Amino acid sequence: MKLEYLRGVSTLKLDAAKCIGCGMCVMVCPHAVFRIEGRKASVTDADLCMECGACAGNCPADAIYVKKGVGCAQAVRTGFLKGTEPDCSCDDDGTCC
């Protein structure tokens, strides 16, 4: 089963110019968001990113940015772990987290 979140909302960014091709992002990503091509990381599908931050936290070249635990991805993950419906705790005025 392929877990996708809302399309186009992931904060994941990869700076290929900074990437050293170590493959740590591939090893730590629980959703196979990365692959190594031509000695550089590339993003397979950013919509698979659950914004856990494992990739950015383990990148020795600081080539990856993701705002860990934000938005709907965090809500989906928390709901899954708690066995509840996703809830991003958005206020009535639209501000979240």
Image (cartoon, rainbow, N blue to C red):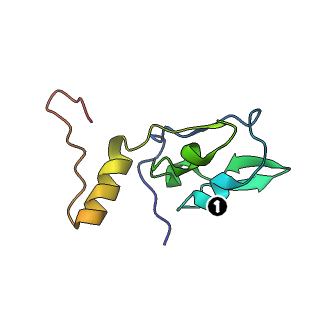
* Horizontal and vertical percent position of residue 23: 72, 54
- Pick the residue in front: 23 or 92: 23
- Pick the residue in front: 81 or 60: 60
Locate residue 57 relative to residue 27 in the image: left or right.
Answer: left
Count numbered badges in the picture. Answer: 1
Q: Is residue 27 above or below residue 8?
A: below
* Horizontal and vertical percent position of residue 53: 49, 46
Could you tell me which residue is drawn at 20 percent across and 37 percent down? 90
Locate residue 32 relative to residue 79 in the image: left or right.
Answer: right
Locate residue 91 relative to residue 73 in the image: left or right.
Answer: left
Could you tell me which residue is drawn at 41 percent across and 48 percent down? 6
The amino acid on which the numbered mark 1 sits, given as a three-letter code, is: Met
Looking at this rendering, what residue extends furthest in the bottom direction?
A: 1
Looking at this rendering, what residue extends furthest in the right direction?
A: 38
Locate residue 3 relative to residue 46 in the image: left or right.
Answer: left
Residue 80 location, quadrant = bottom left
Residue 31 location, quadrant = bottom right
* Horizontal and vertical percent position of residue 57: 55, 44
Could you tell me which residue is drawn at 45 percent across and 37 percent down? 67
Element under disc 1: helix
Q: Which residue is mark 1?
A: 27
